[in-house]
Amino acid sequence: MSLIFGDKLNTENNAFGLHANYSLNGITNFEDSKALGLGSLNLGLFFSRKFDDHWAWNLELLGKYVRGAKGAPAYSLMEPELDALYSGTKYDRKISYLSAAPTIRYLTDLGFFLEGGAQFSWRTRKAKDYFEKKVPDGELSLEVDVKSQINPIDASYIVGIGAFIGKSKIDAVGIRYVGGIVNVMKNQGNNKHSQVAIYYNLPIGRGKAGLKD
């Protein structure tokens, strides 16, 4: 898109490009899992629109987005042989989503910005628990599909801080907290996503827009 429309998508007030973040994830009140223990690399696109010297709107669309929890105690797998193998171990829960995250940014004269907004995510087909156990001959692993236990839609709020970097001051880096509003699992009490993410927004097609580093 940027190769075709780069002169329109990347201007003095607009920016379009690639979004990448590394996040630490957890689920509140989820067994005895580690708080923010699950790491994930997430990828997508972003579009930003600057309204004036202090206010801007930003939208990120994530096609690869994983949330979940790490280190929860093993539960019964309803098969004696599997229970015997994995009893006393821990597992990681990983849930894949498609996500849209609109935020409003307040820009300071020093190049920093504060942001707040929302994130809406749609669960894809992949929602699994991953068990592992070391044995004398190596390592055993097991994947359990838990999609039926996960709510199909997740909503969260976003608060964060960032800065524009580079000679043109259009690349954006930042850190944000993404806190869940709705329960992750169905009929399992109060359990919401929590996430801390460090991200980088890289505009593309800057040559056409005349915005060169």
Image (cartoon, rainbow, N blue to C red):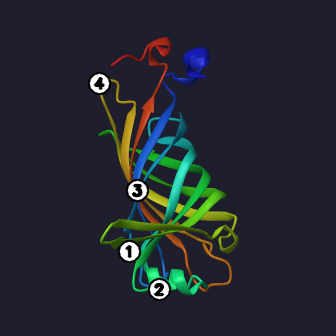
Badge 2 element: helix
On residue 84, the disc is 2
**In the rendered image, the vertical position of residue 208 relative to residue 172, given as above or below:** above
The mark that comes first in sequence, 1 or 3, is 3
Q: Where is residue 151 in the image (x, y as percent from the top left)?
A: 68, 70
Q: Residues within 10 Å of mark 4 (few under 14, many from 20)?
A: few
Q: Position of residue 133 (x, y in %)?
A: 38, 73
Quadrant in which the C terminus appears: top left
Badge 1 element: loop
Q: In 3D space, how far apart are the residues under numbered discs 4 and 1 (Cα atoms)?
A: 38 Å
- Front label number (4 vs 2): 2
Dot 4 and dot 3 residues touching (CB under 8 Å): no
Amino acid type of the residue that numbered disc 2 sits on in the rendered structure: Ala
The mark that comes first in sequence, 1 or 2, is 1
Among the 4 quarters of the image, the one containing residue 4: top right
On residue 35, the disc is 1
The mark that comes first in sequence, 4 or 3, is 3
Given residues 175 and 124, the one toward you in this image is 124
